[in-house]
Every structure is written in C-alpha cells, then in structure tokens.
Amino acid sequence: MEHLLEVKDLRTSFFTYAGEVKAVDGVSFHVDQGEAIGIVGESGCGKSVTVQTVMRLIPTPPGKIMGGSINFLGKDIVKLSEKEMQSIRGKEMGMIFQDPMTSLNPVLTVGLQLTEVLKQHEGLSGQAATKRALELLTLVGIPNPESRIKQYPHQFSGGMRQRVMIAMALTCSPKLLIADEPTTALDVTIQAQILELMRDLKDKINTSIILITHDLGIVADLCSRVIVMYGGKIIETGNLDDIYYHPKHPYTWGLLKSIPRLDASEKGRLIPIPGTPPDLLNPPTGCRFAPRCEHCMKICTEQMPEYSQINDGHQVACWLQHPQAPKVAFEGRG
Amino acid sequence: MAKYLLQRIASAVLVLWIVVSLTFVLMHSIPGGPFSREKQVPEAVLKNLEARYHTNDPLTKQYIDYMVNVAQFNLGPTFRYEGRTVNDLIKDGLPKTATIGFLATIFALGGGLLLGSIAALWHNKTPDAVATFIATIGISVPSFVMATFLQYYLGYKLGLFPPVGWNEGAWRNLVLPSLALGAFPIAQITRLMRTSMLDVLNQDYIRTAKSKGLPGYVIIGRHAMRNALLPIITYLGPFFAYILTGNFVVEFVFGIPGIGQFFVTSITNRDYSTIMGMTVLFCSLLVVFNLLVDIAYTFIDPRIKLTSQKGA
Amino acid sequence: MKLAQNLFEPAISQISAEHINRPSTTMMQDAWRRFTLNKLAMAGLVTLAGLIIFAFIGPFIIKYNYYSNDLMNTYLPPSWIHPFGTDALGRDSMARLMYGGRVSLAIGFVSVLINLSIGVFYGGISGYFGGRIDNVMMRIIDIIYSVPDLLYVILLMVVMGKGGLLNIMIVLGIVNWMGMARIVRGQILALREQEYVLAARTLGASTARLMLKHLIPNALGPIIITSALAIPSAIFMEAFLSFIGIGIQPPFASWGSLAADGRLNIPSYPYALFFPAAAIAITMLAFNFVGDGLRDAFDPKMRK
C-alpha cells in the first residue's frame, strides 16, 4: 500500500551571513492514510523546518531545499511550482501553528478567515460559505457560532483560538494535518481538550496527523508512531511500545527520564540532559549527540552512525547497536 | 462611543482655549503696538486708531472680548488691510490652500504607499534600493529648497510649468506647489510603509495565510495591507500638521495667495490681529483633524475598543 | 561490518558542550562597532566632519571675510578667485557660506543641547516618579504637542523682536524638548523596574545618584539617536526662519538667509541659491544617514 506521504533524504539549509545552517540533514519518514505520528525533539532540532518544508513554507531566501524528495499523493512536492503548491495547501494539506494569537490575523473576522479558504478551494461564497463555516465552528466545539463568526481573534481565549485554527486547517477536509506544537502555548487543561478534539476529528474525517512537539507526554495520547529528531537528523523511530518501553537511543532515554512523574519520589531531582544543542552551522563530525552522551565512544565522534533495524518499524541510529559495541541497557524511567 | 467622543471634544476645546490664550498673551507682550511700524503717525490719528481697535482697553477686557468673538467664529479685523476682517482673508485664501494641500496629500499618500509596498516586497533588491534612496532624499531636502529647486528647474529653466502665480487655479499652476509640498511626506510615508510592511510580512498570520493556499495577491491585499496601514494612520496627525505649516513656504515661494502667505506677511507686518486669527484657525483645524484620525483608527483596528465588549 | 575494536572504547567528549559562542562586549563598544560597519552612516559622519571643518576652520584659511562690499564685482560666476562666486554686494560667496555654516551648525548643536537638558530633566523626573506626577507632566506635554512647533517658533520669534543668534538658539531650544522628554521618560519607566535599580536602592543610593549613575547612562542609546536626528530639524527651522525673514539678519548670514537672498535672482544667477541650498541639503542628508546608522547600531534586534 502506498504511503500518503513519503519523505526521502530531505535536506533543507538556511544560508545566513555566517554560513550554511543545515537545519534538516537527511530525513526520511512516511505517513500512512489515517495514522497519526509524532515528531519529537528539542527546540532547534529541525522538526518544524521539516514539516514546513513539506508544505513548502520555508522562505526561499535564506532557505533552500538542498536535496531529497517529498512524495505526496503521487507528486514530488520538491518539484512543484508555487501555483501547484497553492492548490495543495489548505486543500489536501493543512497546518496549525504554535501560537494561535499571532497566527490569526487580528484585523479580520474569524468568519472571513474561514470563508476565504472555502472560496479559494471550493468556490463557495456568500451564504453557502457561511453555512459551512458555521458547521466547522460547531465541529471544533465552539459554542454560539452564529455570533462568534463575526468576532475578531482577540475576542477569543487561547484554547478557543486554537480550535478556530483547527477549523481553518480542516476546512476542506485535507488528507494530512500538520500540527506544529499546537498545545505548547496553552494551559495544561486546555491542552488535554485540544488533543481530544484532534483525536475525535482524526476518527471522524480520517485525516492523517503529524504532531510536532517537544513533550513526549502528549504524543502517547494521539499518535501511534514516534519519530525522534536531534540536530537535524532522525535518531530513532518506532511505534509507541518501542519508544516508550524499549527505547534504544541514549537521547530518547534522556527524554524519557526527564519527564516529571507523579509517582517519582519527593526527594528525587528532575534529570535534564546536560549540555546544549549542536551548532548547525558547524555540526560536529560523527554523531550529533556525541558531546552530550554519557555512552560516547571514540567512533561516535568520528563517524555518523548508520541506521539499525531493531524490528519491523523500529529503527535507531546509534553506534551502541553495532555488534562490537558494549551492551548498554536503559535504566528505565526515573 | 458617544462618551469617548465627548471626552475628546472637551479635551480639544481645552487645548484650543489654552493655545489661543497663550497666543493672546504673546502678541500683547510685543513691545510697541501694531502701529509702531508705521512712519510717525499724528497723535489724533493714533488716538482714533486705538479707539477703533480697542487697543487701549484694559488687557482683560480685550481678552474677554476676543474670546467671545472667537466663539462666534469672528476673528476680528486685520490691522493691515483697511476694511477687511481676518475672516475675509480666510475666505479668500483657504480654498486655494486647501486645493494645494489636497493635491499634495493624494500625491504623498498614493505615491508613498505604493513606493513603500514595492520596497518591502522587493526587499534588498533594486526596487528597494531605489525607493529608499528617493525617500532619503525626500526627507533630507528641506521644503523650501525643494520648492525653489522645482521652481528653478521645472519652472524657469525647462518652462514646463509656470514658476509663480495662482492664475485662478489653472491646473498647470497647481503642479509645482503640490509637488514641493508633498515631497517630504511622500518620503516619510514610503519609509513608514516599507518598515511596516516588512514587519507585517514577517508575522505568523501571513505564514498561516500561505499555509491555507491563498495566492500572493490575496495575502498582500487582504491580510498584509490592513495591518501595514495602521502605523500610517497614526502618522496622519503629524502629516496634516506638516501640510498646514508647509504651505507657508510653498505659497511664499510660488506666490500663491492662500492663508499661508497671508500668515507669513502678517508676521513681517506685525499685524497681530491677523496672526492671532490665523493661529486660532490653524490650531482648530489641527485639533479637528486629529480627532477625526483617532476616530478613523478605531474603525480600522478592531482591537481598539471604545466601549467595553464581552470577550470569550 | 567489522571495525577496529578500539573505536568502541569510551571517549571523553572533545567538544565542550556548554561553551559560549561569542565574546561579550559592552553596549557602547558593540554599538560603535556596528556603526562603523555601516557604510552610509560612516559616509555621513565623514561628510559632517568635512562640513564642520569647512565652516569653522575655513574662515581662517580664506582671505575674504563675509562683510566687505565690492560693488564692482557683484554676481560673478564661480571662478578660481571666487570658487562660489560673489553675491549682490560683491562679497565672496564662499566666505559667506563658511561663516553662514558656522551660524547654522552652531544653532543646530546648541539648540539641541538645550533640548537635551530640558528634555532629559523633565522626562527623567516624570519617568522616575511615575504615578500622578508622570500623568500630569505627560498631559502637559500632550497639550503643548498639539500645536505644530513651527507655529510656536514663529510666534516666539515675533515676540522676541528681531532675530539674532541667541534668540534663535533659545527659541529652538525651548520649543523642541518635548520629543526628547517623552523618549527619556519611556526609557526611565522601563529601566527603573530592572533589578539593579532595586539593588542600588537597597544599598541606600539617593534619587539623584540613581538617576545620574544608573538610569540615564542606560537610556543613553535613544537619547543619542534622538539628539542626532534633532540637529537637522533645528538647522532646518533656522533656515526656514531666515528664509521668511525673521531669522538671521544681514550683514550676518546663515545658510537659510543666504538661500533667501539667492532666491531673488534665480533666473539670472542661480549660484547664489544653489550653494547654500546644497549645503543645507547635504548637511541634513548626512545627519539622517548618521541618525539611521545610530538607530541601527543601538537596536538589539539587529545584533550580528
């Protein structure tokens, strides 16, 4: 069965006055129809740039797609013209962003920001468009849509605004919804609501979802597969069971250990991952995580690790997987 | 809304009153009266003039009289032009000044918005450099230099437009003064629009609009423009003040008999009745205009609330 | 794939994970560095230096003065003897331009200095004390602000009688301080909430000391920028006043009065207008570049 989205060896760089920043350096993954996957990693690891490249939203100076392919619905996105992209964006692919306050236009009504998508892609206008817009608002759980539709973004609360964003992205029932840290800017209780909403919608409309977050805690709620990124590369990928119970990469261990737990002992301290993310202007040779890894070996600083297949669907890029490497076990969570 | 309006109007009236009073005080602190510039005037005539113009009444009486008159839109007689009141001068001159001011506004706003947008959309490329260069020249060259320059080159040397005169408002006579007046604001607006548009184009909501598959012209025209215009509207207040005072120079250089020219000559003639009258006029116009700009702002930016509205 | 076994020994990480990337600099050093990199701004600075030398040192070099009439030689076009020609009374135009330059530039600098003093004082107090005092002081400014400064300047000049160097400086100084006051106040309001102010106060610093040693030095950036941009504005106003006849009176000259004189004979002798007008325009252009450069140099968002 063909994948809905297949990304192969994608490379995106930014050309700044200081040099070339290799934000995404050889990323490959796929998404199937109807499934939700999560992309997890620290700020600056390239997860946002990856999905924005999929949507071709990266500003082309200073950004540039250096190589690779993105196959979506039988076409290679990397090769499409801007006009062709415009017919895909908003229609087959939708995106919701991190900060709903700044991501909605403050001087336009919410209604207009919804109906313009309908007008653009489905040719609806006037009453027909308004009717659809009202349906969408109801779908995402906004009460009193008739009065809300004429209001402006600043008149909504944070959670409501994010719902509006979701409505906007789902206007044309796209096959793929990309959610770039949709809950980071929201309260924890609202987070849960939004995630539940997304889960419902996925089931109702059968949209595939890519959820980007730095929080492993919320991935389990919604996704069936997880991709862990670091320093512009994918370092581990697998399904929920693989990642949460049998993780193989020291960085994934670090992420799991740093999640605060309710049942942790009171005297225990939170365990962060020491060090800072790599400078993508001058990335280190060898594994990008080596400087911060407590199991770092000589080979780690010299050569980039290859991908090892642990089992069907579970891959990791780490020298610890090499038969000659010492056996290290994950000590389990804190 | 009504409450806000009333507050602003009250505030405006207060400002006007203070300014007029200040002007009154200033004018009456000039040593020598309005007639001291004349050649020696015989005693009797002087007495007559003084009686006629009430210049010997106690200061407070003059003040109150004047205030009462102003409230009735009567700005008093001029000291210079026998038999004509300041109101007459205004009636004569205001339409001419307004025409040039209006043309200059269209030129500055239209040109400025266009140039500024072009500069932002082609940021760091040639159109940007050209527009920025023109803008920098425009704000650096003082208006009277620009006016005399235009007058010399386009008027005298190339003979394209008449270098002086109003000529009953023939359109050829309007070109040079309007250009000269609009030179500085067009530059200012270009710069403002460029910065504002650049800022807006970097905002998240533009990225959202793009992610919805909207074509470029919709993004610019609907999403970017309205947001970019906001700082420009804030500028309209000082802009109007500039048009008002800039007219002094332009009318002076091009020989247009508008209120600007009357004001300037009344200064050289120490015709303090006219000076006061003109000042009252200018300040009233300014205050009214600023009020209108404030009100317009609330219509354009829905985030500004005049009355409290229920949020989420 | 078999690799050398020693490659799998543990390695001490060579790269220090937490090094800080760039050396730190003080704000002034950083701003100066950025300013000097800005070509336009440096060009402006050099031009200004040239103009200042022209105006203040030139008269010592040139052999003409600005007031000797030579009615045999009026309105001469530019030549080697008189590089800028002569004026209506046969005076050397270059000399007049130099002396005029002294006047215009001096007025620009001094009046801004006055602006600065009043503005910093007023704004400092308003910003520091905040609350009601601030409200009242700002309202006063708002009221004064609603009238265009040109109007004030004209009115005050009329009151003061004849124009003159001192009068003009004073008038320009006291009319333009409000913008500076607003900016200083804004800065102080923001700065006084910073922790080092609290720290200093707990150590017992007096108000004056706080203001002078802590708050104002940190507000220096916008103050410098505003001053730099205020100078061309002052020069312009003086030129304008002289242009309409209530500024510098003959036989003294300023660039504005020279331009006004030159206007009278444009068709037949454009040089009398051209040189002073060019001088004004170049000065303002240079100041604008410098001002823009300063603004960019102090703007934290543009750090490289």
Image (spheres, coloured by chain):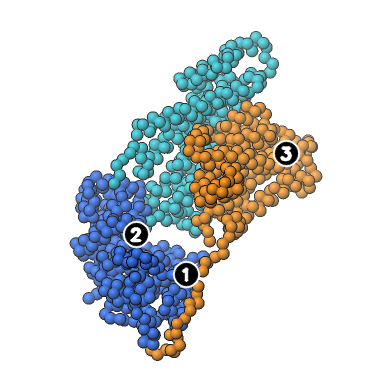
Q: Amino acid at mark 1?
A: Asp
Cα distance, mark 2 to mark 1? 24 Å
Q: Nearer the viewer, residue A304 or B139?
A: A304
Q: Nearer the viewer, residue B25 or B209?
A: B25
Q: Secondary structure at mark 2?
A: loop
Residue lying furthest front in this view? A267
Residue B202 visible, this angle: yes
Q: Amino acid at mark 2?
A: Thr
Where is residue B287? Give x, y as percent.
46, 32
Q: Which mark is residue C87?
A: 3
Colour chain A appears in: blue
Splitting the image into 4 quarters, where does residue A295 fall? bottom left
Labels 3, 2: front one: 2
The residue marked by circle 1 belongs to what chain? A
> In the shown orientation, is residue A257 left or right of residue C76?
left
Residue B244 visible, this angle: no
For label 1, the residue is A279
Colour chain C appears in: orange
For label 2, the residue is A184
Q: Is residue C10 above or below residue C37?
A: below
The residue marked by circle 2 belongs to what chain? A
Residue lying furthest right in this view? C63
Cα distance, mark 3 to mark 2? 73 Å
Determine the residue positioned at 34% across, 61% down. A181
Determine the residue positioned at 28% across, 77% down. A313
